[in-house]
Image (spheres, helix red, strand yellow):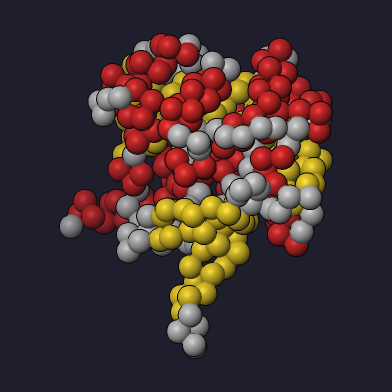
Amino acid sequence: MNDVTALGELLIDFTPEGINSQGNPCLAANPGGAPGNVLVSLSCLGMKTEFIGCVGKDSFGNFLVSALQSKGVGTNGIVYSNVNTTLAFVHIDHQGDRSFSFYRNPGADMMLTKEEIDLQLISDSRVFHVGSISMTHEPSREATLTALQHAKQHNVVISFDPNLRPLLWENLTVAKEQIETIMKYANVVKVSEEELEFLTGTKDILIGAKQIFDEYNLSILFITLGDKGSYAYTKHGLVFTPGFSVKAVDTTGCGDAFFAGVLYQLLKNELILEDLPVENLEKILKFGNLMGAYVAQSKGGIPSMPTFSQIEEFAVSQTKMGIESNRG
């Protein structure tokens, strides 16, 4: 039995690495893609994971498969395409926040077909995780819906992170429609505050959270606010936990690390999603916040994911810093 199986994009994030002796920018090829980031993070925490997706028959595709395997993620669900592996170029500002340029017209991640999915991997999992990028084009859109239907039929908990990337969509109307399609299947959802506003039209966290939670009959909705912290919304209302202050080097993968931390805690809690006490939700949010803050301190999504002992040490150091700042 797998703890989490994810379906979606696996790609190369080219991250800035300074300037070479000729004055030209250097880029590091980091393995990435939100679903892969989540699985690596969970695997580093000791969970059993499997990835379903498509990469190119090229050196980048081989590199990505090796990267997942080196982190303990199962790759039985990966298939190869004659289309090149998808590439993303990450632009990082002075605060560590990033934006993306994509080489994906087409990219291998879009080529996954429903016939290529090993559905047994999904039904043999406790959680099935998806994003929305696999919904931008066919045939991966139909493949994603086939996988979601299978997960639902087999009572597998479905987790969803829209991970909105406007540049990858035909237009934002289509993006919203396809994100809402997945919402109908999901049990646990994570959105950023920007995505919450995009989906609901309001900047009010409480109003927006209630709207999504009620409309799609979710079990838990998580809303991330970067270093400011995060919210959980359940049928009992809204819970907030503040974030942790670190020097951000690269925020790539922070949201994925947060969601992996949340899923880890829920799995450890036997996936009891209903009627969680406030103190349990606060513990889940704190762990997710720690994961996101840890990853912000170094470059690249997959290479930055911590082990459980590393996140424990980080938690202790953050607690000490908090005590010292309070004394000051």
Image vertical order of residue 28 relative to residue 64, above or below: below
Please name whichever residue, 234 or 215, is drawn nearer the observer in this view of the structure.
215
Q: In which quarter of the image is the C terminus?
A: bottom left
Image vertical order of residue 170 relative to residue 70, above or below: above
Q: Where is residue 243 in the image (x, y as percent from the top left)?
A: 34, 43
Q: Position of residue 59 (x, y in %)?
A: 75, 62
Count all numbered tags in the image, as a single digit: 0
Q: Position of residue 303 (x, y in %)?
A: 59, 58
| Image quadrant assignment for residue 9 | top right
Q: Residue furthest bottom?
A: 21
Q: Is residue 65 left or right of residue 319?
A: right
| Image quadrant assignment for residue 279 | top left
Determine the residue positioned at 52% across, 74% down: 26
Please name whichever residue, 314 or 273, is drawn nearer the observer in this view of the structure.
273
Image vertical order of residue 75 relative to residue 223, above or below: below
Determine the residue positioned at 21% across, 51% down: 326
Determine the residue positioned at 81% across, 33% down: 116
Image vertical order of residue 117 relative to residue 219, above or below: below
Q: In this view, does 314 lie to the left or right of 160?
A: left
Determine the residue positioned at 43% across, 27% down: 173
Q: In this view, does 60 lie to the left or right of 187?
A: right
Please name whichever residue, 202 or 243, is drawn nearer the observer in this view of the structure.
202
| Image quadrant assignment for residue 73 | top right
Q: Is residue 240 something one can see in this rendering?
A: yes
Q: Position of residue 183 (x, y in %)?
A: 52, 20
Q: Is residue 11 something one can see in this rendering?
A: no
